[in-house]
Amino acid sequence: MDIPQSTMTRSASEDRTSPRVAILFSGGVDCSVLARLAHDILPTDQIIDLLNVAFENPRALNAARSSSNSSRVKRQPVDSPKPTRREPKHPGLESQIKTPYDICPDRITGRTSFLELQQMDLSISYAFYFAARGSGYIHHPGNEQVQAYSTPARVLLSGLGADELFAGYTRHATAFSRNGFAGLLDELELDLCRLGKRNLGRDDRVIAHWGKEVRYPYLDEDLLRWALAAPVWEKCGFGHVQEQGKDRVEPGKKVLRLLAGKLGMAGISQEKKRAVQFGARTAKMLNGRTRGNQLLSLRESPRALMNMET
């Protein structure tokens, strides 16, 4: 896999087994197949870190705290002093941020993609930003022990590209139901044409903040060439008679689901598609009145991320 050795000073045994690659892992079919293939390719004593993140709805937490406090604490007098405002962790940073261009002035895609980014992109960026940091906790199997951990891996694997190649999004099913294979092909072409300036640019800038390199196995040139040449009905199950019961396979990304089943991951092959922002619950971090397809304000992205770190 051409994973570079770490420059940190360690013993030979530690350097051989220490994680050199980590996977942005949600538990879905895309990243699970990557994890299995990486396990088969790398030496058996080489550790592979699976990075997963999850968030809680801040509005629900505040409501729960307010309800709990109101049941135990007497109402404060009218003339009681107001609670002091929490100072930001990075004072003065907000005034220094002019536009997102100041953060990545050397990236052409950084300038153009911000004109198209939506609230959904911000939710997805939250998940990748904190997952790529690689700092959190690990749970040891078989007991309740929780240990603080930071991955030393500098190379991350992402499942980006699987949905665009193998029709994994809900809108692909909608396009097929409306206009058949012709409509599905038009939707897939749209996704692939904007993949570089939107999804790839967004994810690369967020992950590069931590000095990590992200690789996209599903966008490998050979795999991409095969996927684009294969008939669309061989890559997904739309238009086919769907099996019922435990053997039923979702039509989206059917070729990938069949591969997962062949690799012995029957449960994974039947996992329903769940978007990153909903699986990690980062969509709940935004204002409840915003919609995922609402265009992102030019000043909102850095300010929102700054608020999450305070």
Image (cartoon, rainbow, N blue to C red):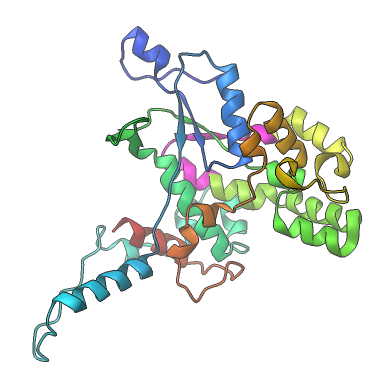
x%, y% of residue 135?
34, 39
User: At 62% across and 58% down in the image, what residue appears?
Assistant: 112
Magenta highlight on residue 211: yes
Kindly indicate the quadrant of the structure image that contains residue 9. Answer: top left
x%, y% of residue 162?
69, 41
Residue 20 shows in this picture = yes
User: At 51% across and 39% down in the image, what residue appears?
Assistant: 24
* Image vertical order of residue 270 relative to residue 59, above or below: above
* Image vertical order of residue 275 relative to residue 255, above or below: below
x%, y% of residue 70?
20, 78
Magenta highlight on residue 13: no
The quadrant in which the N terminus is found is: top right
x%, y% of residue 138?
35, 35
User: At 71% across and 52% down in the image, what residue appears?
Assistant: 194
Instruction: Residue lying at the far top in this picture: please name it.
Output: 12
Residue 107 shows in this picture = no
* Image vertical order of residue 178 relative to residue 31, above or below: below
The residue lying toward the viewer, choosing from 136 and 269, is 269
Q: Is 232 on the left or on the right of 291, as rendered?
A: right
The residue lying toward the viewer, choosing from 54 and 286, is 54
- The residue stretch that appears in magenta: 204-218
Instruction: Residue lying at the far bottom in this picture: please name it.
Output: 78
Q: Is 140 on the left or on the right of 88, as rendered?
A: right
